[in-house]
Image (tube, grey):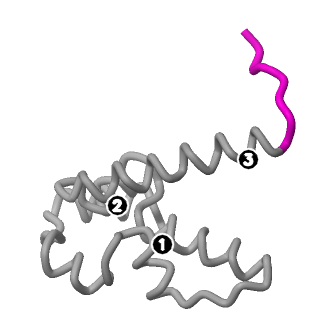
């Protein structure tokens, strides 16, 4: 089945809603570590914040990395790290190194 035809505005609205839902889901799932996301999906919350910042800058909106991270994390990154980030296991680190060489 092909995707339904829709105008650009509707498509953008649907994509934006899906993005907001993803961000809300990641904010709720603090048990899911960034290294888990990187190992399974090849991106993490930090990647989302960098993509968000890059798109803002492409539109002429200056946005710092810390501000973009706060938009994605829902709090300052350092606060999120202190509350939720765990030390990566040797297995997680090995998987990351194997699946993301040079990252």
> At which x and y percent is residue 76?
32, 83
What is the number of the mark on residue 96? 2
What main secondary structure does the magenta stretch of the protein show? loop
Does the stretch in magenta take in 13? Answer: no
As drawn, is 72 to the left or to the right of 33?
right
Which residues make up the magenta segment?
Answer: 1-8
Check disc 3: other Cα within 10 Å, few if <14, some if 14-19, many if 20+: few
Residue at the spot of label 3? 12
Instruction: Give the mark nearer the N terminus: 3 vs 2.
Output: 3
Question: Could you tell me how far apart the alpha carbons at marks 3 and 2 are, in whole angstroms?
Answer: 33 Å
The secondary element bearing badge 3 is classed as helix
Q: Is residue 91 above or below residue 40?
A: below
What is the number of the mark on residue 7? none
As drawn, is 100 to the left or to the right of 4?
left
Check disc 2: other Cα within 10 Å, few if <14, some if 14-19, many if 20+: many
Question: Could you tell me how far apart the alpha carbons at marks 3 and 1 are, in whole angstroms?
Answer: 31 Å
> At which x and y percent is residue 45?
41, 64
């Amino acid at each position: 089945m092909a995707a339904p035809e829709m105008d650009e505005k509707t498509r953008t609205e649907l994509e934006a809603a899906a993005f907001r839902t993803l961000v809300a889901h990641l904010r709720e799932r603090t048990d899911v570590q960034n290294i888990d996301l990187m190992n399974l999906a090849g991106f993490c919350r930090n990647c989302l914040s960098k993509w968000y910042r890059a798109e803002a800058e492409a539109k002429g909106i200056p946005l710092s990395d810390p501000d973009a991270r706060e938009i994605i994390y829902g709090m300052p990154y350092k606060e999120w790290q202190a509350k939720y980030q765990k030390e990566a296991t040797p297995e997680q680190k090995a998987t990351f190194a194997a699946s993301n060489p040079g990252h």
